[in-house]
Every structure is written in structure tokens, then in C-alpha cells.
Amino acid sequence: MDRPGLDRALYHACLRNEVKEVLRLLARGANPNQATEAGQPLLAQMVSQTPHPDIIEGLIQAGANVNAADGAGRTALHVAGICNRADAAKLLLAGGADPDLTDQEGRTAYDYAVRYGAKPEVLSLFAGALKIAEDPEHRLTLALGAIQNRENEEARKVLEEPGRMPSLSRAGIVAHYAARAGATEILRLAARAGFPLEAADAAGDYPLHSACRYGQADAARLLLSLGADPARENREGYIPLHLAAVTPHARRAAKVRCARVLLSLGSPAVAQNGRGESLRLDARANGLNEVLDLLPPEPGEVPVDPQAEGVKELVLYRDSETRVSYRPNNIAYPLEIARWEGRDGWYGTAVAAGLALQGAENFLTQVGLGWFSPVIESWVNTAPMAFFDVVRLLRAETGTRPEIKFFD
């Protein structure tokens, strides 16, 4: 096999993670410094892809340039930081990789390890190479990485070392990480150490907001017992209960449990966020009927009887989690986006209807029904379109008659 053939064979053997074949081809003289089709050094590609450190070690021993960079200036060591690869980082550092090299954004491999929440082992490897292992900022970073990776015992050891933490103002971030992870023992340790529990993070959240954003009811309960204010707004104008209802970072049961904890321990049940949306609207938009049942009705909110004569539903789009439908009977929600099936009832106010229409236009565009936008505009500016007009439009666009049904 000629040299180009060897190189191609090595490339494909690496992509297939064939350890023995990779080592055989390298022994025959295949080029370990070739680049992938995307221009990334093969060594860096393997750090991100292969689960076999023997391939990485084989490339290094065959003469791969450990400091070769891609078009963005990222080396294999940067990739090890991004991918949380302690095994690869050890091999690269032992092979002469330079931990001080920066990419085009000015970031080192350590910076990427921090940014992507690497485990303490990876952070410690880079910190040792950079000779910053005893730096207070690194000790804080090490603790945060441990919390993020659910290594709470490691975090506790780092946080309890006397005189090794940065200023208390910087240490306030510990409460946020612990709240997001539901690490109540770390929150208690932070409280004993005097770390701030009411400091805002870069996004404007307070620790109680962080707990609710990630559906951590136990952390929320503990923070409330330590004096957290359930009525405090973040930068976006949300109180913690709002975040418990709208967060995409938690499962439904966790959202509901978090909301119950907040309401039982003093959270306001009537509030608006920075966009003027109410708690009930947030809960309704996310299909949290269990939370709706705990909240008092808003002024002017009238339940709509789904059994009323003439109430029909035109289903425009449906999948396992989402239903988009039109109800042409002067319901305040002329277009309903129901994210959960089996809802208890339908409610409407003039404000809620307007917000529903705005959200519906964006959603319909995403699912390929952008043609419906002019109809939405007509609803906003004039009386709702007649039911048969909607059917006619839908048939003209899709060639099929939509599903029409009475409410059960």
C-alpha cells in the first residue's frame, strides 16, 4: 500500500475506533499529523471521538504534533478540556502539550474545562500544569466543578480547607451551583462558612431562583428556611414561583413539587413578571393544572364551559406533547397551544388571548404553518375569522380537511 493509501486507511480506522488496525498502520508509517475533512488535526478529532486512549497514545508516540491547532486555534488539549477527558489530558500533557496556548478567542484548555463544567480531576490536571493549583480562584473553580458533577464529597473537602477560598463576594456563586444541583449539604456548608446566600449571579438570578429554575424543591425549602425572599424578583422580573412554572430545565413533577413548596412557605400567589404575565398564565401555558388549582382566580378571569353548545375544535397540529387548535366560539383563546393533554378546563382573559396569539404565530411558523400568520393578524385586529373560513384556508394549503371534533 502506498503512503496516501496508508494515510486514508489510518483516517478511516481511527473513525471506526479500530485500535489494533490504527496501531498497525502507524507502525507501517501512516501519517499521524493528517487533518480531517473539516481541517481538524486527527489527534484532536480522536480526543473528541474515541473512547480508546490507546489510539490517542498511539498517535502521540508515532509523532503527532500535540500542539497542532484547527482553524479556530484549538489544540487537542483544548478539546480534552471541552470533552472532560482526563485520560486524554494526561497523555497530551505527558507528550508535551502546552497548557498556556490560547485559541482565537483567547481561551486556554483550562478555560474550556471551566466553561464546560469539567470534573475536578480534569481541572486539577490543567491547574497543575499551569502552576495555579493553590490559587484561591482555582480552588473555587474546583469546588464548583465538583458540585456540577455531583461530586459533593470532593466539593466539601475543597470548601472546608481553611484560608483557601477567594473573597466572600466571589464565594457567593457556590450557593447558585449548589441550588441548581440540589446539593443541600453544600448549601448548609456555605451557610456555616458565611458564604453569601442572597447574591445575584451574572444572569440576575438569586439562589432561590436558581433552585426553582432547575426544579430543586429541597434546595428551595432549605433556602427559604435560611431567609430567602420568595417575593424577590430577578432581573427579568420573575419571582421564584414564576420560574418553577416556566423552566425548561426540570420535569413536570419537579416543577409542581417546587411550586407547592414555595406556596406553602410564603410565596405570593398573585404576581406578574417583567412582561406583565401572571402566575396563572405561566402555569396555564405550561399545562401545570396542579399549580393552577393552588392559585386564586385573577380579576376578570372566567372559566369557559367546554360542554357549551357549539363548542368545536379544529386541530391544526398534534404530536405526543403539543396540540395547536382553533375554537371558533368567542372563547378568549381563539387559538390554544396546549402543551399537555387532559387539562381540567379552559380559561381566558383579553390579555391572555393576545399573548396566546403572539406565541401561536411563532410556533406555527416553526412547525411549517407560517401561512396561518395573516389569519392570526386578522384575529388580533378584527373579529375572529369564521370557522368555515379557517377550514377553507387549511384545505387550500394542505389538500386535506382538518380534524374537527366536539369536546368530550
Image: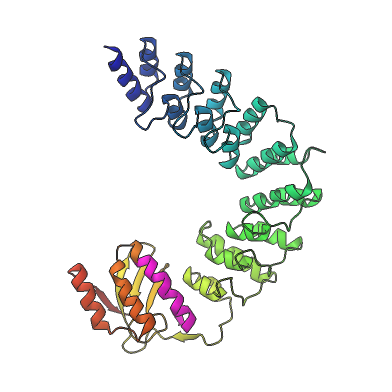
Does the image show residue 344?
no
Q: Residue furthest bottom?
A: 309
Residue 258 rendering spot, x and y as whole percentages: 60, 63
Q: In which quadrant of the rendered image does the C terminus lie?
A: bottom left
Q: Is residue 354 above or below residue 37?
A: below
Q: Is residue 185 above or below residue 30?
A: below
Q: Give 13 or 167, whichever is nearer the viewer.
A: 167
Q: Could you tell me which residue is drawn at 54 percent across and 22 percent down?
A: 92
Q: Residue furthest top?
A: 28
Q: Could you tell me which residue is drawn at 72 percent across and 66 percent down?
A: 229
On screen, residue 229 versus residue 92, left or right, reads right
Q: Give 191 or 46, whichever is nearer the viewer.
A: 46
On screen, residue 256 versus residue 59, left or right, reads right
Residue bounds of the magenta highlight? 345-364
Residue 153 rendering spot, x and y as whole percentages: 69, 40
Q: Could you tell me which residue is drawn at 38 percent across and 21 percent down?
A: 34
Q: In which quadrant of the rendered image does the N terminus lie?
A: top left
Does the image show residue 373?
yes
Q: Give 348 or 169, whichever is nearer the viewer.
A: 169
Please say whether residue 72 is one of the residues in the magenta stretch. no
Residue 335 quadrant: bottom left
Q: Could you tell me which residue is drawn at 56 percent across and 75 percent down?
A: 276
Residue 272 rendering spot, x and y as whole percentages: 59, 75
The secondary structure that dominates the magenta segment is helix
On screen, residue 398 versus residue 174, left or right, reads left
On screen, residue 2 versus residue 143, left or right, reads left
Q: Give 343 or 31, whichever is nearer the viewer.
A: 31
